[in-house]
Image (tube, rainbow, N blue to C red):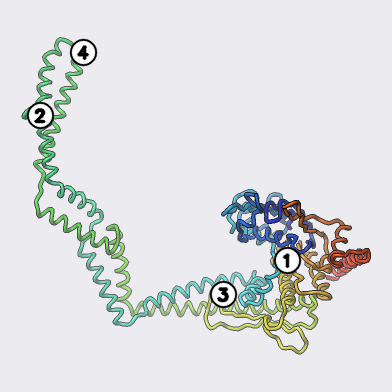
Amino acid sequence: MLVHLHVKNLALIEETEVEFGPGLNILTGETGAGKSILLGSMQLILGGKFSRSMIREKTDYALVELLFQVENTKVKERLEEMEIDPEDGQILLSRKIMEGRSISKINGQTSTVGQMKAVAALLLDIHGQHEHQSLLYQDKQLEILDAYGKEEILPVKEKVQEAFREYRRCLADLKALDMDEEQRNREMAFLEFEIREIEDARILPGEDEALERSYRKLVNAKKIVDTLQEVHGITGYDMQGAGDMVGTAVREFSRVTQYDEELEPLEQMLTEIDGLLNDFNRELSSYMDSLVFDDETFYETERRLDLLNGLKAKYGQQLEDILAYQKKQQEKLEILVKYDENFRLKKKCLEESEKNLEKVSNDLSEIRRKYSRQLEQKIMEGLKDLNFLDVAFSIAFEKKKSFSANGFDQIQYEISTNPGERLKPLGEIVSGGELSRIMLAIKAILADRDEIETLIFDEIDTGISGRTAQKVSEKMAVIGAHHQVLCITHLPQIAAMADHSFEIEKHVNGTETSTQIHILDEDASVRELARLLGGAQITDAVLQNAKEMKELAQVHKTSRLKSV
């Protein structure tokens, strides 16, 4: 359950911390006090979007922290599957919002918003005052049914999704082959041309690099020859070249080394230089003799490079890419050559995948129908608890004309709220308040099956009053006996059922406005209940009425829970 909430610098909230208890936690306050902001802070933990306007003015960031005590064994197992280990059974979720970005953490470890959203979805469920409108959509209705029977439905649903992917693949393959003879002949001719063009080139991997080196050498032939001749003359042994001059230096140096032994290393060095120059000149001469620059070689090299570069422009930047393209086109050609056989195989693949998809979709539909009968009964029981006295509820099935990853079921929630009235789709007969109660009944059912420990209801009382409000309050008390419930309400009937009462207040200090939340003791909770009953004027009679209402609610709750 949610044991601690800490919010800082979020809209009107400067900083507030509150500890929630088990059972039914009721939050009340004047209109505009900031109840929606408090709920919005929890939505942020569930991955809700944020904007710069959410950060309190004159501050750089906003922070939301939720601390949960995890008791449910199955939830712990799911957390372990996500590689999250509750420390002393606790999970701390935090999200820090700054200009243009946010930082999410789970037990102090940085996480993605998606990871935190997945964890938070195991720990709490928020029902906002407008969410019940989604109940009018058939996709949402099917989602609820699948959630109700998820332990048996989900594995079969995964098989349907896999079968649907295979069906779509086979369908796409068959469509790719679906062409008339003329189109097929054109495609084959084009593929044969491309394959033959690449084959005729007789490409050798890496030859383009060797040709480019050779081409650079041929293009610069005259410059190479002139430079080598000049260097050979400068370093040679004719006409006062370096070799001739170093040779003379060696002879002259040798005449004096006999007079000083220390000159011998220098003589040796000079002799080595003379040898190196001699070797260099011999190698250079040999290289110059091997140079062949003829127009035919240049023409052939240039022509081959042009051919390879032309193929690169059409089929790939590297020679390896061109060869890979040739292989790919060859495979396409082989498929077209064996068109009739391949078409037959692809058609067989489609037929078999469609047959398998039909089977697993039928399996899924049967399981859904089984759980739909259970859900119908559960919803009717829940609606009767919420003051639908003569209600009939049904889940009607219809088969779609085409398959989907969700099977072929299309369902419609139908209801009758008056005796003798035929069942009709929800959107045709129910009001906003009735939709809200239907969603409350469904949330209670799913919460029991999902084993979510914390449920949050934002103004579930919209559009109801009187006896119906009393029934809703009783339902909330029953839910609170098995789950932690946080409920924002304006109705005294619901507030009177509270196990723990909290007030959300707005304070104005000069030019600054801030919102605070604090727990109410017994006397304060009675005064808040009196405010809900009496409005602006709270008299002694209203206070007495509030006290009696709270006492009766607690007595009724105790007796009701004993009978459940």
Q: CA distance from mark 1 to mark 4?
A: 103 Å
Task: Give how far across and how far down residue 156 sits, in percent.
Answer: 58, 72
Q: CA distance from mark 2 to mark 4?
A: 29 Å
Give the residue at the far front of this rendering.
510
> Foreground mark, 1 or 3?
1
- At 77% from the left and 70% from the top, the residue drawn is 461
Q: Is there any visible trace of residue 551 in the rendered image?
A: no
- Snapshot quadrant of residue 37: bottom right
Name the amino acid, label 3: Asn
Name the amino acid, label 4: Glu
Q: Which mark is residue 283?
A: none
Quarter of the figure with the N terminus: bottom right
Q: In this figure, which residue is indicated by the disc labeled 3?
A: 406
Of label 2 and label 4, which has the lower sequence position? 2
Q: Count the marks.
A: 4
The local crowd at label 1, few if under 14, some if 14 to 19, many if 20 or more residues have their Cα within 10 Å, is: many
Q: CA distance from mark 2 to mark 1?
A: 101 Å
Of label 3 and label 2, which has the lower sequence position? 2
Q: Is there any visible trace of residue 511 in the rendered image?
A: yes
Q: In this figure, which residue is indicated by the disc labeled 1?
A: 458
Q: In this figure, which residue is indicated by the disc labeled 2?
A: 241
Q: CA distance from mark 1 to mark 3?
A: 31 Å
The local crowd at label 4, few if under 14, some if 14 to 19, many if 20 or more residues have their Cα within 10 Å, is: few
Of label 1 and label 3, which has the lower sequence position? 3
> Foreground mark, 1 or 4?
1
Name the amino acid, label 2: Gly
Give the residue at the far bottom of this rendering.
420
> Which one is nearer the viewer's eye here, 513 or 239?
513
